[in-house]
Every structure is written in C-alpha cells, then in structure tokens.
Image (tube, helix red, strand yellow):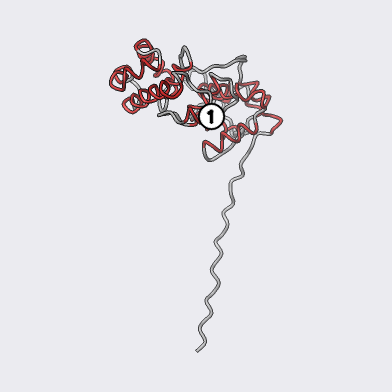
Amino acid sequence: MPTATEPPPKRRPTVPQARVRRMKTADIRPFLEAISAGNPEPRTELHYADPFSLLVAVVLSAQTTDAAVNKATPGLFAAAPTPAAMAALGAEGIGPHIRSIGLWQSKARNVAALAELLVERHGGAVPAEREALEALPGVGRKTANVVLNEIFGQPTMAVDTHIFRLANRTGLAPGKTVREVEDGLVRRIPPDLLRRAHHWLILHGRYVCKARQPECWRCPGAQWCVFTPKPAAPARGRRA
C-alpha cells in the first residue's frame, strides 16, 4: 500500500525583533563633549601613586566600589609599596588590609601572585602589553584596558556596568555582551576622544545616567541621546 505523505512541517511564526535605536554618528562627538562637563583630562577615581598601585587597585575594584577600595588601600600600600614587598607580604599579609571589600580572600591571593610574577617576569615593572597584563592573576580584559588607558595613554575602552548600561541606553553603541559594546564604542567614538571617553562615560553613568533612573533633566547630552521617555525632574522637595 502506498504510504501516506507526511504533511509539511508548520512554519514557526516570525517574531519581529525590537528595532535597535542607535545614536546618529554625527551626534556622538557633541554628546561626548557635552558630558565631559569641563573635564578635559579625566582620570580614574581610584587612588594610586604609580602603575603598580593602580594595577592592584583595579584588581581589588572588581565587584566593589572605587570608594571602598580607596578606603582599604592606604594601609596596604604603606605596608607593601612595591611588587617585591607585596609578594613578600603574601596573601596572609594582604588579607587583613582588604577585609572590608568584596571577595577579599581570592583578591588577596591574586594580588600576591601577580606581584610575584611581576618580579619574576618583568623585573617588578607593570608591562605595557595587553597579553602580558592579561597573563597576570586576577587581570582580565577590563582591568588591562584600564591600566593601558590610564598609565600608558592607549585609546582603550574598559566596559564596566556603567558603560555597558549607558552605551545601550543612549544608543551610543548597543550590544548584548561586554565585548560587543566595547568593539562598538571603539568603532564609533572619534579616535581623538576615545581615550578620554572611557572616563567620561564611567563618570556620567555613575553620577547622572544612573541605573535606577537616569537623571535626564540635568544631563547636558540629553538632546542627542535616543532614550525615551526621558524622566522629568522630580517635584521640589522630593529626592531623585
């Protein structure tokens, strides 16, 4: 007997994808210049005295605020101001100085190990190459980008939670992953602004374009931002 012909599979209905809104290329420069807030040479808010202390501070800042790190590091750097001294201090000696910050036990081990490798492989100097930095314990792409930008003046973009949120919210460089956002920002931001834009975006995300609610009413770059609807200023007498 002839076999019944199997009916063709039903086609799944296509779900329309939400249109990704991007900031116009021509609007990127005026937006960045507006949010620079008269801060032509922005710097990290982490306290440091040299490349080594910045590297350690950035490693400690993972999942912790810069303010918390700044409270913990003075005693640590007084006890161990160099990679050799930090390696000698070891995780057991580092730990008591950083107990107030998150993940302090693993961070103490990483800082001790990276200090030892700096002495062994680089003569105690912080390398200026990404590959060498990322080979150090506790140092990922974001940490390397911060060091390369802040210390060595390279036009890198370290995407933290603030920059990731702001890049998507404003339409500056929408992306689903940190790397996608980083690549988009590097590609879209004018080269002469890229190094400084890293800090401008962090500061803007931290103090104006906040996670809970962007304070669009006091954002100098609001006219170029694609985010809608923009929140209105809170009524007088109420906190934002």
Disc 1: which residue: 163
In front here: 76 or 84? 84
Residue depicted at 53% across the width and 29% down the height: 163
Q: Position of residue 129 (x, y in %)?
A: 53, 26
Q: Position of residue 150 (x, y in %)?
A: 54, 19
In front here: 121 or 15? 121
Q: Is residue 122 above or below residue 8?
A: above
Residue depicted at 39% across the width and 21% down the height: 115
Residue depicted at 63% across the width and 30% down the height: 225
Where residue 193 sits, quadrant-wise, is top right
Residue depicted at 48% across the width and 14% down the height: 50
Please indicate whether residue 14 sits to the left or right of residue 126 in the image: right
Please indicate whether residue 174 sits to the left or right of residue 121 in the image: right
Please indicate whether residue 231 sits to the left or right of residue 52 in the image: right
In front here: 239 or 149? 149
Q: Position of residue 178 (x, y in %)?
A: 52, 36
Q: How many marks do you count on the picture?
A: 1
Q: Secondary structure at mark 1?
A: helix
Q: Which amino acid lies under the numbered mark 1 shown in the image of this protein?
A: Ile
In front here: 116 or 76? 116
Q: Is residue 179 above or below residue 223?
A: below
Please indicate whether residue 14 sits to the left or right of residue 95 in the image: right
